[in-house]
Amino acid sequence: MRTFLAAFLALPALVAGLQPEKRSVTVYNPTMTSTSTAAAADATYTGAAAYDTTVLNPPAPPTDLVKDFPVQLLSGGMDGLSIKQKGSFMGFSIELSVADQILGKNSSHLQVPFLNHMSALKARAGKVSIRVGGNTQEAAVMFQRGSTQDMLSKSSADQTETPLIYFSPELIYSMKNISSLIPTEYYFGLNWIDPNNFTNSVLVAETVESILGSDLLALQLGNEPDLYDQHGKRPQSPYTFDIYMNEFQQAVTQLNAAPAFTNKDILLAPSSCCMWNETELFQAGFVERFKNDLKILAVQHYPTNNCKINGNILDPQAIYPDFLRHANTGYSPVSMVNPYRSSSAIAQQYGKPIVMLETNTASCGGFPGISDSFGAALWAADLAFQLASANFSQVLLHVGGQNVYYNPFTPPPTNQSTFHQWTTGAIFYATLVTARRSDYTPGYAIYENGSPSKVVLFNYITDPSGASDYVAHIAIGGGQTGQPAAIPNSVKVRRLSAASVNQKYNVTWAGQTMGDQFNSDGRMKGELQTETIQCDTAAGSCAINVKAPSIVLVFLNDQTLADSTPRMRVLRRSPLLPPLKSTTPQPSTRRCSPPRMAVEEALRRRKIG
């Protein structure tokens, strides 16, 4: 797949922001029971959060919108271009405790809708990146023996507590079999809750490396360690940088002493979220000290939370406008990314990628009417491009269970699985837009091989009258640039559309949709629609209309359109494979046992039609 360079376009309404402090807390033990939520129209809903019916009122259109402006690009590059980026820039972070619900109950019974969702992304991005971990990785123990039915189990005396997770290597085999069907790379989280009892995590590291092989991107060591002291996960308070680095060294030493752990530079850290300044941690010597052990630097962050800490309850209707702006205010992408720019610069100095390992609209499950709306899709796509322009190498949207609002995709409740299909959340569509290489009207340019190849234009406004639509006049060279005009005769356009930012389902991408609630099998439905817009070569520009609300992806040449046109294969039934019973690897085993290898070969040869 081609890599791309994402450049931020300073459209008229956009200004450079200051560097705000980041203080958004995630919690380890959120209450996971269903909650009643007041909608904007004072209705109530008492079911699972994933299917909440709350619809918020969209903000009123602004009165001072600039509705016609130039977008000037240059041949050969522009100031502020990012590092080269991969097409699979956006991926998914799957909470370990629900991995069996999302991936499949075992390696022989994979979830077809999940595979189809990933196939839709792979068809556009070339491959998929998935992290399995989260808060529950810090309460996870692997047991070596067990049948294929014992992939993952949970135990908790208190249903409001993070459950103790038991999993077998069958989980890792399921991940491997998925990557045999859909090219997939994985981050996997290790339990580091007790630095003095790390033996099982060493075994996990050996097993994951053995089974996943080259499909393993990195092993995450530590999940939000900046909250360890606040959540009672460490006896020391404060949990200082020095204590953290000394304990990190202890874990590295144990891993490197394990005979079957051969990939010595596969770790990902610090995965801090809230209370630390990562630039200060890096300057304190973290990257220098562990540069031979760290493959990837990572952070995790949500712009706000719905944790209701100390009775602090945020009103979704009141804060909704803060997600529907681009500039350095509220919960905007610029406001969220700016504090990480200096950390990203240090990562570049050391030649290390930096990733946003976990994010979404709000921690503790998100907000009804916000996290499950088309507005969240606009926000997530904008965030991805903003992170790319800040030289992040990846961003992963978090996926939880039935009691969160922000899921990109959700399987039906177990007792409804025979008559309901999956639900595709609006935010999933953001990954399709980004899988290619003004405050309310941000834009980005994507460069390939030094030339502009695509432009992405946003409109956050809801206004069915058409009065808040705008026109962007794209020019390449010409004018006062000192370069000859290089505008093509025509460009191609695809649109991410909904009637309002508050719309939850039936969002369309290039005329296709995954449908309504409980009506998705992970396949796009409808005819792919690509518009041709004739350019004014005499004026040296192409006029692109951006409707309110929408995202418009403009293809500046036919090759980038061809590269972005999906050749998607789909599954219509589960890849039901013979159960594998004698498949538990010994820690020293570097390859899958012969029966498992036969299954993987069968998966590779299986025709998906």
Image: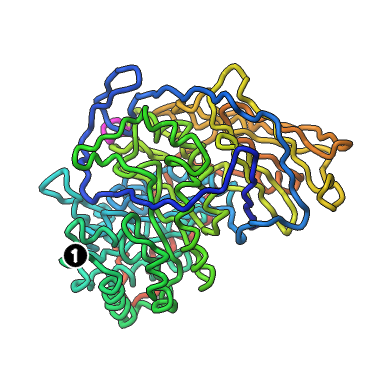
From what the image shows, is residue 501 above or below residue 581?
above
Q: Secondary structure at mark 1?
A: loop
Q: Residue at x 48, y 42 (%)?
A: 380
Q: Is residue 113 at all visible to an observer of this figure?
A: no
User: 149 or 424: which is nearer to us?
Assistant: 424
Q: What is the basis of the colouring in this image? A: rainbow
Q: Residue at x 41, y 31 (%)?
A: 320
Magenta stretch, main secondary structure, is helix
Residue 267 on image: x %, y %: 39, 70
Quadrant where the N terminus is found in the figure: bottom right
From what the image shows, is residue 242 above or below residue 36?
below
Residue 606 on image: x %, y %: 51, 51
Residue flagged by tag 1: what amino acid is it?
Ser
Residue 323 within the segment the image draws in magenta: no
Q: Which residues are magenta?
A: 413-417
Q: Residue furthest left?
A: 157
